Amino acid sequence: MNQDVIHVYFMPGMAASPKIFENIQLPENQFKMHFLEWFIPEPDEALKDYALRMTKKIKHENIALIGVSFGGVLVQEMSKYLKLRRLIIISSVSSKHELPKRMKIARKLKAYAIAPTSLASHIDTFAKYAFGSNVKKRVELYKKYLSVNDKRYLDWALKNMVCWDQDKPIPGTIHIHGEKDMVFPCNHINDCIKLKGGTHIMIINKFKWFNEHLPSLILTGKAV
């Protein structure tokens, strides 16, 4: 393999599997794609400690690290332990100030502690958390793309999403966000590349845009 190839690591969203990236393609002569997967956290594990453990799965240097939604939050925490070529977040937030009001209220009231994470009886409710309330066929999407159904993980993930405490964006972060994202509304996002018509699952249904623009964003930090 070309020694100059850039290794690109992808982190899926909350409870999601790498299948959400199944249509993402990067030129093979320039990039090598790797897919990270969620594992079960330790009891009361801090997000920063989980992120450190996830970095152990990175086997290359000077990588591009890409995360979606809560995976975007995780890769930001991971970046604090790594020297990256590029940090890209998609359909995510870059600080606690970009969280929607309902999540800020949930944090204040500790409502995450009573969130319906028992997926056997609440698949549709959890799919709303993961994909947004207006996505058609939520349960079908869940069955295909959400693979982590362990209650320990789900309780941990919801708590750490709502209670994420990063005060300022990490300098140099590239933030790509859909104008119609209902999970993290675009009007709360301060500095991003806005994707017209993009929803919270645009990594799935707007993959052509990403295939066209990700190479340039990784190489130069700018979209073509």
Image (cartoon, grey):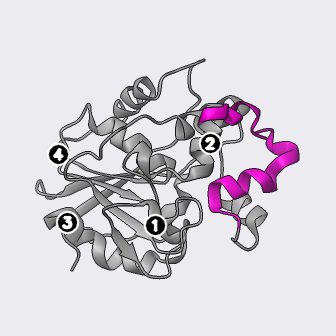
Give the residue drawn at x 23%, y 75%: 223
Is 98 placed above or below 109 here?
below
Q: Provide the residue span drawn in magenta.
A: 108-133
Q: Tell me, yes or no, if residue 58 can be seen here.
A: no
Whether residues under marks 4 and 1 lie with C-beta atoms below 8 angstroms apart, the answer is: no
Is 205 placed above or below 60 here?
below
Give the residue drawn at x 74%, y 39%: 115
Cα–Cα gap, marks 2 and 1: 18 Å
| Residue type at numbered disc 3 | Gln
Secondary element under disc 3, as helix, strand or loop, is loop
| Residue type at numbered disc 2 | Ile
As for residue 120 lying within the magenta part, the answer is yes
| Residue type at numbered disc 4 | Asn
Q: Which quarter shows the C terminus?
A: bottom left
What mark, if any, has residue 30 been given in the picture? 3
Residue count near mark 1 (Cα–Cα under 10 Å), binned few <14, some 14–19, many ≥20: few
